[in-house]
């Protein structure tokens, strides 16, 4: 008989936020440990930044933990649409949505990109697009997020956790950006496999002066405003971008 404890159900509870989530392996057990998230500056900022009834587009939703967090904050009237390229993560995320009986909460399986088509990706827990093709890669459908407008309309907030593909993703959001949504960039890793992410270009495309937003820089564990000066003062941003 196997002694493997995975998967099991954990509960996250903080103030008026409460939801259940699946813990499927040691990586996610450590990553989503409740006490870390309760004391994390990013969680506190999410609570300030996101309002009841908001409509959120989360690009790079992983296994659905943050999707459930956002849905819990937005409440019954809020709408959360998550985009995730790893099929297994989408299955787990959808099971979390069902576990919590959330409505107006959706997970879509494709890679947000600047054009529709197919690209290679590495099917790891946190999948990434790649030019190279090998035994470790699979094909994934890509699509511009602007095409979501037909089914979901415009969003109040767009949250990106795409590890170096910010520019590619935002080029496919040009119409969505016309409604001036709030922007959150989560920089957990500084990888640019397509060598296309550049903050100067990103801020030029978005014209940051017209948007409310913030950037979380994991390596420095700090939040900075979504503007030129704050990002240019970050040593991590300067080194990698």
Image (cartoon, rainbow, N blue to C red):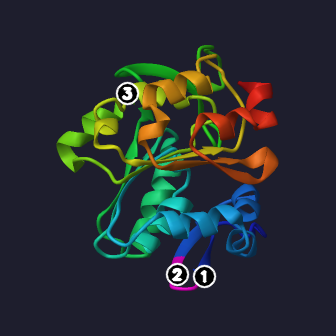
Residue 65, magenta (yes or no):
no
Residue 113 in sight: no
The answer to whether one can see residue 82 in this image is yes
Which quadrant of the structure image shows residue 100?
bottom left
Q: Which residue is mark 2?
A: 18
Instruction: Between residue 4 and residue 151, name the one nearer to us.
Output: 151
| Disc 2 to disc 1: CB gap under 8 Å | yes
- Give the residue at the far bottom of this rendering: 15
Q: Residues within 10 Å of mark 2 (few under 14, many from 20)?
A: some
CA gap between label 3 and label 1 equals 35 Å
Which residue range is magenta in the image?
A: 15-19
Q: Main secondary structure of the magenta part?
A: strand
Secondary structure of residue under mark 2 = strand
What residue is shown with label 1?
A: 14
Quadrant containing the N terminus is bottom right
Is 17 inside the magenta-drawn segment? yes
């Amino acid at each position: 008989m196997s002694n493997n404890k995975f998967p099991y159900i954990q509960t996250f509870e903080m103030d008026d936020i409460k939801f259940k989530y699946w813990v499927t392996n040691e990586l996610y057990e450590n990553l989503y440990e409740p006490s870390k998230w309760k004391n994390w500056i990013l969680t506190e900022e999410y609570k300030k930044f996101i309002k009841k009834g908001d409509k959120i587009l989360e690009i790079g939703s992983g296994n659905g933990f943050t999707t459930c967090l956002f849905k819990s904050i937005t409440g019954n009237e809020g709408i959360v649409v998550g985009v995730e390229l790893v099929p297994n993560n989408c299955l787990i995320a959808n099971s979390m949505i069902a576990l919590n009986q959330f409505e107006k909460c959706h997970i879509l399986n494709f890679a947000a990109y600047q054009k529709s088509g197919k690209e290679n990706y590495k099917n790891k827990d946190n999948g990434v697009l790649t030019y190279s093709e090998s035994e470790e890669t699979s094909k994934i459908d890509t699509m511009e997020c602007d095409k979501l407008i037909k089914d979901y309309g415009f969003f109040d907030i767009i949250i990106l956790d795409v590890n170096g593909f910010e520019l590619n993703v935002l080029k496919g959001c040009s119409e969505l950006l016309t409604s001036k949504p709030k922007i959150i960039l989560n920089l957990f890793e500084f990888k640019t496999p397509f060598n296309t992410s550049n903050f100067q270009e990103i801020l030029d495309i978005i014209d940051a002066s017209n948007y409310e937003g913030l950037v979380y820089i994991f390596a420095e564990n700090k939040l900075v405003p979504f503007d030129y000066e704050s990002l240019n003062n970050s040593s991590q941003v300067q080194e990698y971008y």
